[in-house]
Image: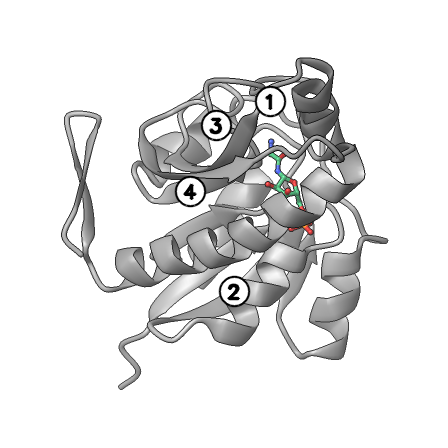
Amino acid sequence: MENKKRIVVFASGSGTNFININENIINGRVVLLISNNPKCGAIDYAKKNDVDYQVINDFRYPKDKNKEYETVLNDYQPDVILLAGFMKKIPNNIIQLYKNKIINIHPSLLPKYGGQGYYGIKVHEAVIESKDSVTGVTIHFIDNEYDRGPIIMQTEVPVNDFDDANTLSKRVLEMEYKLYLKVVELFCSNKIQIEKDKVIINE
Ligand code: GAR
């Protein structure tokens, strides 16, 4: 019997973090991609590479109780859910059902440049605008606010004088691939626990 952890990824955009995890993960297996955007790169890749996918963009239900996510996730029984550039808020019923099993990646050193309105290139534009000399990557368990919840790992990325938002985003993205894969491997090997909102890592 296969004992690899079952991973469901949520992505809305080009999906390069999703692709990186799908292609390189050892202790887990991506069993499903969920997207709100049928035309995104993540869905394109899933179609071409035989990854199960579902497009869910249903606003008939109240935001805090989305039955469609619940039904689909129940069918796929994930051990962990990864948000990888997913631009919708995860409804409260899903956060409760998968408590401490939903992980997000964000391209800044949270709590800086997080929250509604800070996503993708907008984060890097804000860093450049503020003339910060360092930015980075944060990986965290989610709670019911955008880009908030117990932090698992962070890595710094220096901001160079010649950087603009595009050059910076490329370097941060390279770091995202490394850090997300590392965290997911650790989680899939039962080496990341959370007790009373405190993350414990046994590397
Ligand atoms: C990544 O930089 C990720 O950290 C960011 O969106 C990008 C998705 O890229 N996520 C957020 O901003 C979440 N607030 P990808 O689709 O190529 O993986």
- Inter-mark Cα distance, 1 to 2: 28 Å
Q: Give the residue drawn at x 59%, y 59%.
A: 18
User: Where does label 3 land, which residue?
Assistant: 109
User: Where does label 4 land, which residue?
Assistant: 103
Residue 125 or residue 43, whichever sits in front: 125
Q: Secondary structure at mark 3?
A: loop
Query: From the viewer's perspective, is 44 left or right of 192?
Result: right
Q: Give the residue drawn at x 62%, y 65%.
A: 19
Q: Nearer the viewer, mark 2 or mark 3?
A: 3
- Inter-mark Cα distance, 4 to 1: 20 Å
Residue 136 position within the rendered picture, expressed as x and y whole percent measured from the top left: 51, 35
Q: Disc number at residue 21?
A: 2
Q: Give the residue drawn at x 53%, y 22%.
A: 146
User: Where does label 1 land, which residue?
Assistant: 63
- Whether tag 3 and tag 1 are in contact, CB under 8 A, the answer is no
Query: From the viewer's perspective, is 64 left or right of 192?
Result: right
Q: Nearer the viewer, mark 4 or mark 3?
A: 3
- Inter-mark Cα distance, 3 to 1: 28 Å
Q: Secondary structure at mark 1?
A: loop
Residue 60 seen in this snapshot: no
- Inter-mark Cα distance, 4 to 3: 16 Å
- Whether tag 2 and tag 3 are in contact, CB under 8 A, the answer is no
